[in-house]
Amino acid sequence: MFWKKKNLIADVIENKCDNCKRCVQICRHRALETAVVQQKTFTFVNYPERCTGCGKCVKICPNQAIELIERYC
């Protein structure tokens, strides 16, 4: 099945994110990931080409730490 990409992409707002990983779990396209860098955990869009702009991660985030921004080609 092919997914139509919108002209939007998810963007994680670092200072609002508490790394609950709900967005990582709900993303069926596996665009989001978490990583530990210098003993701090970060959630970020590691594969922007996979993001379809569906907004499921935005809806599930309890801290409103994800927004959809315009995709730049």
Image (cartoon, grey):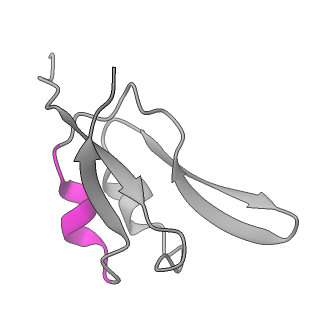
Residue 20, compared with residue 47, is above or below; it is: below
Question: The C terminus lies in which quarter of the figure?
Answer: top left
Q: Which residue is rendered at x = 31% and y = 55% of the image?
A: 26
Q: Is residue 44 magenta?
A: no
Residue 21 spot, x, y in % from top left: 48, 67
Q: Classify residue 3 as left or right of residue 28.
A: left
Horizontal arrangement in the rendering, residue 17 relative to residue 72 (left or right) = right
In this picture, which residue range is highlighted in magenta?
Answer: 54-62
Residue 24 position by quadrant: bottom left
Indicate yes or no whether the magenta region holds residue 60: yes
- Identify which residue is drawn at 18% across, 68% down: 59
Residue 65 in percent (x, y) is at 38, 72
The image position of residue 62, as x and y in percent, is 31, 82
Judging depth in this view, the residue of 29 and 10 nearest the camera is 10
Relative to residue 1, is residue 13 drawn left or right? right
Quadrant the N terminus occupies: top left
Residue 37 placement (x, y as % from top left)? 81, 59
* Residue that appears at 76% across and 61% down: 36
Tell me how many marks there are: 0
Q: Quadrant of residue 51?
A: top left
* Front position in the image: 64 or 2: 64
In this view, 71 is above or below 58: above
In the rendered view, would you say 56 is above or below 63? above
